[in-house]
Image: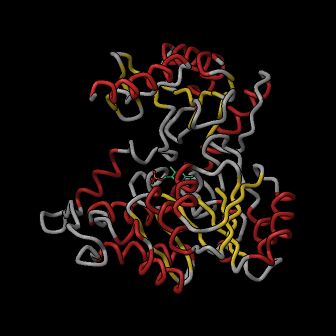
Amino acid sequence: MEQRLLQSYRDELMQLEEKSNLRSLPEIIHRERDVIRRGRQMLNLSSNDYLGLASDISLRREFLESLTPENFLPSSSSSRLLTGNFEANRDLEDLLCRLFGAESSLVFSSGYHMNTGILPAVCNSRTLILADKLVHASLIDGIRLSKAGFARYRHNDFEQLESLLYKNHADYERIIIVTESIFSMDGDEADLRRLVALKKSYPHVMLYVDEAHAVGTRGGKGLGCAEEQGCIADIDFLTGTFGKALASVGGYIVCSRVIRDYLVNKMRTLIFTTALPPVNLMWTRFIMERFGSFADKRNYLKKISYRLREQLAAKGYECPSTSQIIPVMIGDSGSAILKAEDLQRKGFYMLPVRPPTVPEGTSRIRISLTASIRAEEVEHLISLL
Ligand SMILES: *Cc1c(COP(=O)(O)O)cnc(C)c1O
């Protein structure tokens, strides 16, 4: 009986393998900007360390000097609502408020906790969520866990969004528009100002923006696309992760005092989990305090991203990206795997992205540029594509 139970899992894994969609955890060793896999050393073009801060030893050295056995706390040992709310939490949230010029902020264990926790907390059955078709899996899970009504609009199709608002506005107490600023898989971005204008056309519409790939990389102070587009104060739920450009781990929201108080009372992924370790919060604050000074890295990243996108287009690749996330569209999963392996043999660690992460037939190689990649390495890569 037990064997038969396992057999059905085995069958499913075999089906995944037949479609070239079977996944496994890569065994890799890290060497600063490089990774070593099966004895081959390659430049890592698959991480989200967009500013190259996670591989910067001098930053870590400086941070370590501020640590003592007394303030090095690797665990908070409790939920924030019990005894896990350390000074490091308040310090980081104060800094977020100061940087964003916001009334309030709240830090979470990860971007995944953030997106699966906020929407279920702030929505009820008289809420409608209107989300971009391409939002991240964590947002989809948050929507599924909520009691809200739910519709998706075609990617960045604000006309369709407008008509959905028009059709539904009278039937709901509250509507929340959900989008990313830079999108994870296509690397393109949303026009936040237009979304702000749209939400303002009804008194009961709010806007939720996930800046996971934009915080650190966009805006004069590195606060994201909302800073770049001058609309920080108009976004009701302005969220992001510390796990990408910020070289750390955790998620955050910048919001009104009321929303923060409400989340503290209602958000299950905040209440029922151990708070981030203080040492990690201190490291995030250490990085964020230096944010303004990374403008050179942001500009350089912008420059090499533009160069790669331009050259991909010249080679005839369809390239939706406007950012450092640059998909090379291949089509079927098998070809995407072969192409990725070929590029790996040539020293560039890039991975194929396949269904269900992206729609069937749009398998691709996803390049994540980071500010630690040299211009000549970008040129070499271009010559191989
Ligand atoms: C990576 C990502 C997340 C998840 O953040 P983590 O901190 O890694 O859990 C959420 N939203 C988007 C758009 C992401 O790309």
Left or right: 169 in relation to 40: right
Left or right: 166 in relation to 147: right
Q: Quadrant of the N terminus?
A: top left
Q: Is residue 292 visible?
A: no
Q: Position of residue 53 (x, y in %)?
A: 43, 48
Q: Position of residue 16 (x, y in %)?
A: 50, 23
Residue for point 33% across, 68% down: 272
Nearest to the observer: residue 118 or residue 368? 118
Residue 385 lies in quadrant: top right
Left or right: 69 in relation to 203: left
Residue extending furthest front?
1
Residue 3 lies in quadrant: top left
Nearest to the observer: residue 8 or residue 181? 8
Residue for point 38% across, 61% down: 109
Residue for point 70% across, 71% down: 231
Left or right: 262 in relation to 218: left
Residue 209 lies in quadrant: bottom right
Residue for point 56% across, 14% down: 338
- Colouring method of the image: secondary structure
Residue extending furthest left?
69
Q: Position of residue 219 (x, y in %)?
A: 64, 61
Nearest to the observer: residue 182 or residue 198? 198
